[in-house]
C-alpha cells in the first residue's frame, strides 16, 4: 500500500540532520498550514540547488561553476593552502579569521571502517596541487577527532613529500569538537597560533 502525500512529505523532511519523526511532522504541518508560498519557494530552490551546485575543480568546495569564487580570485595568497573537512568548516574559517589563502575541501575525513580512504577525499588531487610548487604551507584544519587527527597526520606526510611545510591549528579548539560549532574568537585564535606538525 502506497503512503499518502502527507506521509511522503513528512518522510522527506527526515533527510535533514537531527530531524526525527515529530520534528518532520511539525515542519510538514507548518508548511501546509501557514507557509504554502514559502514551501513552494523552498521546493524550487532546493530542486535548483541539487541540480546546479557541484564542486569546484580546484578546491572541491560547493560551487555553481567549475571554479569557485575563492579559487578564481586573484587576490588570494596562493602560497597558503588550508585543508578542511567540509564546506561548513571552510565558511567558519572564512568568517572568523583574516585568512587570505586558498582552500582544499576534503568532503570528509579518513575512516577506513566507513570505506573512506585517500581516494574518496581527493588526496590524489591535493598531491597534484602540492606538486605544482606554488604552495609553501599546508594549514591542516581537520577537526580534533580521532579520524580528524589521523587525517591530519596523513596530510602532514603528504605535504612533506612535496617539500611543503605542514601546520596545524592549536590552542582553543576542544578535543572531539567540530570547527563549525567553535565560536569565532576561539577559532580565530587557534588559526593565528597554528604550529608546525612534528614528524
Image (cartoon, rainbow, N blue to C red):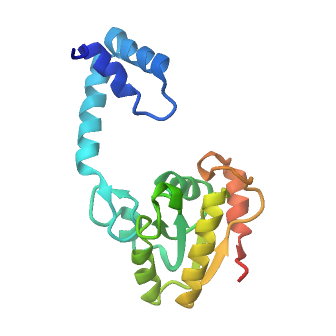
In the image, what residue occupies the spot 73% across and 60% down? 189
* Residue 61 left/right relative to 176: left
Say if residue 79 shows up in the picture.
yes
Expressed as whole percent of the image width and height from the top left, the position of residue 23 reads 48, 20
| Image vertical order of residue 124 relative to residue 43, above or below | below
User: Is residue 122 or residue 84 the one in the foreground?
Assistant: 122
Expressed as whole percent of the image width and height from the top left, the position of residue 174 reads 74, 53
Q: Looking at this view, name the residue that lies furthest to the right.
A: 171
Q: Quadrant of the C terminus?
A: bottom right
Quadrant housing residue 84: bottom right
* Residue 195 left/right relative to 93: right
Quadrant housing residue 193: bottom right
| Image vertical order of residue 124 relative to residue 39, above or below | below
User: Is residue 182 or residue 6 the one in the foreground?
Assistant: 6
Say if residue 109 shows up in the picture.
no
* Residue 155 left/right relative to 73: right
Quadrant housing residue 43: top left
Expressed as whole percent of the image width and height from the top left, the position of residue 113 reads 52, 57
In the image, what residue occupies the spot 35% across and 63% down? 68
Please count the marks in the image.
Answer: 0
Expressed as whole percent of the image width and height from the top left, the position of residue 90 reads 52, 58
Q: Quadrant of the N terminus?
A: top left
In the image, what residue occupies the spot 63% across and 79% down? 166
In the image, what residue occupies the spot 35% across and 70% down? 72
Amino acid at each position: 500500500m502506497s503512503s499518502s502525500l502527507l506521509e511522503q512529505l513528512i518522510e522527506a523532511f527526515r533527510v535533514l540532520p537531527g530531524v526525527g519523526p515529530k520534528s518532520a511532522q511539525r515542519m510538514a504541518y507548518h508548511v501546509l498550514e501557514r507557509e504554502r508560498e514559502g514551501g513552494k519557494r523552498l521546493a524550487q530552490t532546493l530542486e535548483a540547488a541539487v541540480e546546479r551546485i557541484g564542486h569546484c575543480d580546484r578546491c572541491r568546495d560547493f560551487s555553481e561553476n567549475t571554479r569557485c569564487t575563492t579559487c578564481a580570485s586573484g587576490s588570494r595568497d596562493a602560497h597558503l593552502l588550508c585543508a578542511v573537512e567540509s564546506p561548513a568548516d571552510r565558511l567558519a574559517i572564512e568568517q572568523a579569521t583574516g585568512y587570505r589563502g586558498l582552500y582544499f575541501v576534503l568532503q570528509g575525513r579518513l575512516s577506513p571502517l566507513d570505506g573512506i580512504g585517500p581516494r574518496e577525499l581527493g588526496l590524489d588531487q591535493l598531491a597534484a596541487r602540492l606538486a605544482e610548487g606554488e604552495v609553501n604551507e599546508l594549514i591542516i584544519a581537520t577537526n580534533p577527532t580521532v579520524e580528524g587527527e589521523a587525517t591530519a597526520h596523513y596530510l602532514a606526510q603528504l605535504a612533506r613529500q612535496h617539500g611543503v611545510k605542514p601546520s596545524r591549528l592549536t590552542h582553543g579548539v576542544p578535543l572531539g569538537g567540530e570547527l563549525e560549532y567553535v565560536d569565532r574568537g576561539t577559532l580565530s585564535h587557534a588559526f593565528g597560533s597554528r604550529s608546525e606538525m612534528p614528524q
